[in-house]
Image: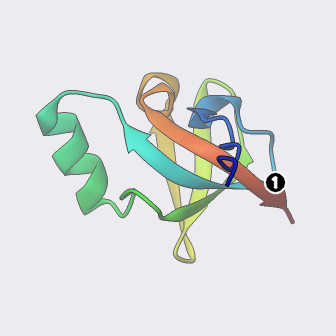
Amino acid sequence: MPAKPSTPSFPLCQLPARATGRIRELTGDSDFCQRIREMGFGESTYVTKVSGSHTILCQINGIRIALSHGAARQILVERIGSR
């Protein structure tokens, strides 16, 4: 049985506006990963990028959260769709 091709993952900051992605990996240090998970950005969570390039406005579980570009760069997602 051939292996299913995996969807490429990329930083949340590169997700287009109004697109939805699923978080696949957090790449920061352990303190960053713990804090970002406490904010709701856990692996397999769906996140929609609302807008932004320097400050990224995201929606997760119905709540809008602003992230710095540096923080969004450490959250790897796979694109799911757009709204």
Closest to the observer: 12 or 6?
A: 6
- Rendering coords of residue 1 (x, y %): 67, 55
Horizontal relation, residue 34 to residue 1: left or right: left
Callout 1: 10 Å neighbours few (<14), some, many (20+)? Answer: some
Which residue sits at x=59%, y=59%?
Answer: 47
Q: How many marks?
A: 1
In this view, which residue lies farthest toward the front? 1
Which residue sits at x=60%, y=35%?
Answer: 9
Which residue sits at x=36%, y=58%?
Answer: 42
Closest to the observer: 76 or 65?
A: 76
- Rendering coords of residue 19 (x, y %): 79, 52
Q: Amino acid at mark 1?
A: Arg
Q: Secondary structure at mark 1?
A: loop
Can you say whether 68 is above or below 79 in the image? above
In this view, which residue lies farthest toward the right? 83
- Rendering coords of residue 51 (x, y %): 74, 44
Q: Quadrant of the C terminus?
A: bottom right
Closest to the observer: 40 or 76?
A: 76
Can you say whether 16 is above or below 59 in the image? above
**Which colour style is shown?**
rainbow
In this view, which residue lies farthest toward the left? 31
- Rendering coords of residue 75 (x, y %): 45, 37
Horizontal relation, residue 35 to residue 7: left or right: left
Q: Which residue is mark 1?
A: 18
